[in-house]
Amino acid sequence: MPEKQAVSVSSVIGGEGKLSDLKVFHILESYNIPLASYGFASTPGEAVEIAEKIGYPVVVKVVSPDISHKSDVGGVRLGLTSSSEVYRAVEEMNRVIQVKAPGARIEGFLVQKMMPKGVEVIIGSLNDAVFGGVVMFGLGGIFTEVFRDVSFRVAPIDVREALEMIEELRASSIFDGYRGMPPVNKHALADILVKVSHLIIENPWIDSMDLNPVIAYPDKAVVVDARIIVRR
């Protein structure tokens, strides 16, 4: 099973447009941004090894530069709870994708710990022509497009400004505990916001970045999925 290694941001860019999931995760790791445990597999057997190491349940996603919407072509499997399910999922993905996305290059498969439910938020950033680096915070998951409840700051920001961004949301009370849900660790979210603000400032070739969802818990916050677009 291939081991993850620390890499510099510049060494994984190497192109334009949307970066692969694996490159995105390496960039985030270089800034110590917390991610759900994961590994990269080239074969069904490697996928099983990774799943056994990080623990079930897991999610398996195809890694391909030619596929933008993985779920549309059968490239995502959720809630896998055994080695046989993981092995079969990778085999089936290979078959289904060849039919639904013929010619798509399959670089491998991302095997990731499936995180328990928490409060989902989105943390984003962009390099604006006028303001330069800008960081964004809002409700994540399915609520991102529905409520558009977001706050913005010009990067870089500090912890105080990050906490202000969190409190500015109309639905900020959800972070203090709501209808039986425990309060979340706002400082863990603020820490990610600060790191993202520095990432976008220090890497101007990154055009935009979305971490969605970031799942917040009482003791931590973890990035589950992310996208980076490199400036053309």
Image: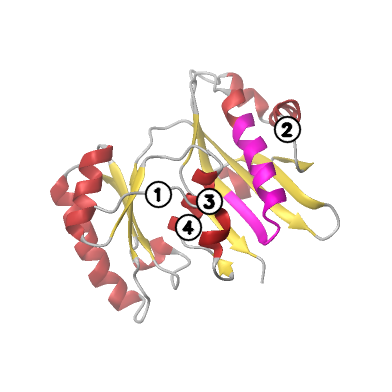
Residue on which the image places disc 3: 27
Q: Against 28, is 69 above or below?
A: below
> What is the crowding at mark 2: few (fewer than 14 residues within 10 Å), some, or many (at least 20)?
many
Mark 1–mark 2 Cα distance, whole angstroms, equals 33 Å
Q: Against 164, is 130 above or below?
A: below
Residue plotted at (68% across, 30% down): 166
Residue plotted at (68% across, 60% down): 207
- Asked if residue 73 lies left or right of residue 89, the reply is right
- Please give the label number shown on residue 165: 2
Residue on which the image places disc 4: 23
Which percent across, then down, holds residue 174? 60, 25
Residue 202 forms part of the magenta stretch: yes
Which percent across, then down, holds residue 196? 64, 43
Mark 4–mark 3 Cα distance, whole angstroms, equals 6 Å
Of labels 4 and 2, the one closer to you: 4
Which quadrant of the figure contains the C terminus? bottom right
Q: Tag 2, which secondary structure? A: helix
- Asked if residue 232 lies left or right of residue 102, the reply is right
Q: Quadrant of residue 204?
A: bottom right
Q: How many marks?
A: 4
For the residues bearing labels 4 and 3, Cβ distance under 8 angstroms: yes
Which percent across, then down, holds residue 169? 71, 33
- Asked if residue 35 lies left or right of residue 57, the reply is right
Q: Tag 1, which secondary structure? A: loop
Q: Tell me the magenta residue range.
A: 190-210
Residue 66 forms part of the magenta stretch: no
